[in-house]
Each structure stands twice: as C-alpha cells, then as structure tokens.
Amino acid sequence: MNSYFPEIKKNFGFGCMRMKMNGKEVDLEEFTKMVDAFLAAGFNYFDTAHVYIDGQSETALRSCLTSRYPREAYVLTNKLSESCFKTEADIRPLFETQLAACGVDYFDFYLMHAQGSRNYDHYQQCHAYEVAQALKQEGKIHHLGISFHDTAAFLDRILTEHPEIEIVQLQFNYADFEDPKIQSRKCYEVCRSHGKPVIVMEPVKGGKLVNLPEEAANILDSLHGGSHASYAIRFAAGFEGIAMVLSGMGSMEMMEDNIGYMADFHPLSPAEQEAVAKACAIYRGQDLIACTECRYCVPGCPMQIEIPAFFKRENNKRTIRAWAGDSSISGGTPADCVGCGQCEEICPQHLPIRELLAKIAQAG
C-alpha cells in the first residue's frame, strides 16, 4: 500500500492524457486490455481531466474501467481545468458532468489543474478551492490537490495560502530536474518543506526520454538493465515524498514494460544514477524544443496549426540520422501563425512558441 494514501496500492499510476487512437477516436479495445493488465498486476491509480482528448479520456474510462469493475477496485483522479469554467456558478455543474462522464459518484482525488501565476487569480476569484472543499465535505471528493506548472516561489505562495491542499502533481524528470524554467528540484523541495506528497507527471517528458539521442541511448543501453523509460521513471520514483509516478501509456507494450519494473520497484543504483546523469547532459546539449506534446496549445489556435507535430518534426531533424522528412501534417503551417499568443499563455513548458514557429517557417 502507498505510505501516504492507503487506498493507492502501489506508487505507479496510469495517466490517461495520451491514449492509442483509431483515427480521432480512442481505441477502446486496446485501452480495455491495458486497464485489465494494469489492475491484474496490482496497480489501481488512474488520472484524467475533462480537457484530455476533447473529453474522450473520461468517457473511455467509463467504458473500459468504471462500468466493468467495482468502485473499490480503482482510484480515480480528475481535475478542474481553467478553460472549463468562467464563474463560480459554473464549477458545480461542470463537476457533475465530470462524474457522469466517468461513471462514478465521487473522485478519490480532485486537482486544481495547471496552477501558476497565469491562472491562479481566476481560481481565487471564482472561489474554486472553497467549492472543492465543500464538495469534499459532501463526500464527492476524498482528497484535494493541485497540478502545478510555474516557479517554486509561486508554488510556495499557493501552498501557504491553501494549507488544505493534500497533494501536489509536478512535472518531474531527470532532464527538468535543474531546468531554470521548469524548476523540478526546487518545486519538489517546496513540497517537502510544506509536508505535501508529490504525484509525478511527465517522468519521461512526453516520450523525449524514451527516444533519446543516439549517444545518450548508448550509455543507458550499456547498462543492460531495462528500457530508457525504466530509468526515467525509476529516477522520479526514487525520491522521498513521491506518492505516485504517472505514465501516459499508449500501448500494451508500454504497459507491460512499465508494470514489469514497477511491480517490484527498486531505486536507481549508483552506477545507474551516473549513467542517467551522463545521458541527461547529452540530451540537454542537443538544444531540442522541449515540447511534451500535451496539445494544450492546439484547440485554441485560430489557424489550426498542429504545433506539437511541427516541433516533433523539427526535433527529429536534429536527432535522427538520415531523416527523410515528413509532409503529412494537416492544418495550418508555421508561416500561418498570426502571433495571437494564446498558445504561449497555456503552454506548461513556457515555450516561446511564436518565435519557434517563425524560425521553422523561415527555415522552410
């Protein structure tokens, strides 16, 4: 059992932001198999949000998990996302919509989503924390938390102003550990100082720490101890105060790999820590675009630019030898960007998206 929340069986969770798709629809057959394998291996924590996959994450969980297993068999986390409410009066109806979409009567954890200086005032003005506390008193939420993308100083402010927060979800991986924008280590230390356990998101940085540059990959491969993902996830899980590490698993192969080494978790050995540090230095030296393909930037783009796809293509040019090119990206092009900036406002990686798109357009 988890040392912080006994209802959580193990310290590894199923993140449901990225799923295998059939066209524009979630592959429910594959997801059902993955849910069954996850639970059969002794894990029980699932994470979703109303904004994930345009609402399909929630309904897929209803189809493949909550309608097929008793409520005590799983732990389910959902979130209150900024784009889903404009006033305090919107929050309760939205929450009831989320319960219905997921097919449950309560959420084990409910998080104020992607908190930071950009949106915190909106949550405050709408009394979102107070509404969530009332829902908790009614038994519709068991634990209240936040997910967070900002500086350590701002995290300290939120945790000081809202001591009722029980848990914090942080982007935490070896590439971002000392990153001055993400501040993984500093934010983790703030959580420790406030006595708040941490849920890790993006432990493999949206797959970036799986598909490593060749030189970095060779260092980890020489250990002969596991997949690239295993080193990244075990790095994150090895810190004190980590209640849960989430992985967005998009296939049964990913699922089998992850539950294989997390079923009997062991922190990184000194030799593995040294190898990871070397791989990290090489990765950061590539000067790649630090997009995790969360796709938060896409729905609001007035020119329908598939921003993550162009960033992925640009990174592939820099890292894949004999890269043959890819012209299959639909929608607008980087040259179509009108510079509105909505993408930068919502980007959890704090990327200068307009500047990056301009450079890609100029390069052709």
Image (cartoon, rainbow, N blue to C red):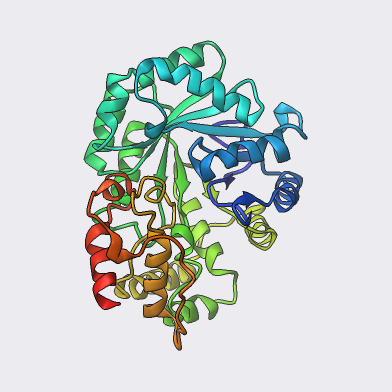
**Relative image position of residue 120 (x, y in whole percent):** 28, 30
53 and 8: which is toward the camera: 53
Say which quadrant the N terminus sits in.
top right
275 is higher (above) or lower (below) than 152: below
Residue 274's quadrant in the figure? Answer: bottom left
**Relative image position of residue 30 (x, y in whole percent):** 72, 53
Label total for image: 0
Residue at figure coordinates x 43%, y 64% from the top left:
309
The answer, for residue 327, to whether it is visible in the render is yes
- Looking at the image, residue 229 sits to the left or right of residue 298; the answer is right
195 and 330: which is toward the camera: 330
Residue at figure coordinates x 48%, y 77% from the top left:
217
Residue furthest to the bottom in view is 322
Residue at figure coordinates x 49%, y 81% from the top left:
218
Say which quadrant the C terminus sits in.
bottom left
286 is higher (above) or lower (below) than 249: below
- Looking at the image, residue 327 sits to the left or right of residue 74; the answer is left
**Relative image position of residue 78 (x, y in whole percent):** 52, 32
Residue 45's quadrant in the figure? Answer: top right
108 and 18: which is toward the camera: 18
The answer, for residue 352, to whether it is visible in the render is no
- Looking at the image, residue 183 sits to the left or right of residue 264; the answer is left
289 is higher (above) or lower (below) than 239: below
334 is higher (above) or lower (below) than 8: below
Residue at figure coordinates x 36%, y 45% from the top left:
300
**Relative image position of residue 215 (x, y in whole percent):** 43, 82
